[in-house]
Image: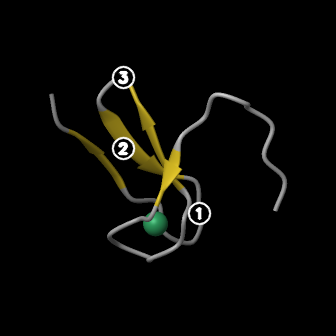
Amino acid sequence: MELKANDMQLVQCPSCSQSTLKIENGCHSCLNEDCGFSKCDV
Ligand SMILES: [Zn+2]
């Protein structure tokens, strides 16, 4: 896996259980293309 962004915070995705969940501006979006989980909680 190749990750570019230095400041990107990745946590475990509740959907696919991979550490590919990006948190940005209060929105969660999974970087796993097979998952596609996304959710915004503000
Ligand atoms: Zn996921």
Q: Which residue is at the far top?
A: 25
Residue 37 picture location, percent across and down: 39, 59
Quadrant of the rendered image containing residue 8: top right
User: Which one is nearer the viewer's eye here, 42 or 6?
Assistant: 6
Q: Is mark 1 within 8 Å of ligand 1?
A: yes
> What residue is shown with label 2?
28
Residue 22 picture location, percent across and down: 49, 44
Q: Say above or below: 3 vs 42.
A: below
Residue at screen point 64% across, 28% down: 7
* Badge 3: residue crowd in 10 Å (few <14, some 14–19, many ≥20): few
Q: Nearer the viewer, mark 3 or mark 1?
A: 3
Gap between marks 3 and 2 measured at Cα: 8 Å
Q: Amino acid at mark 2?
A: His
> What residue is shown with label 3?
25
Residue at screen point 35% across, 73% down: 15
Q: Amino acid at mark 3?
A: Asn
SS for dot 3? loop
- On screen, residue 3 versus residue 26, left or right, reads right
> What residue is shown with label 1?
32
Q: Say above or below: 8 vs 10.
A: above
Sequence-first tag of 3 and 1: 3
Residue at screen point 15% across, 28% down: 42
Residue 11 picture location, percent across and down: 46, 56
SS for dot 2? strand
The colour scheme used here is: secondary structure
User: Which one is nearer the viewer's eye here, 34 or 8?
Assistant: 8
Residue at screen point 44% across, 76% down: 16
- On screen, residue 39 versus residue 21, left or right, reads left
Label number found at residue 6: none
SS for dot 1? loop
Q: How many marks?
A: 3
Q: Amino acid at mark 1?
A: Asn
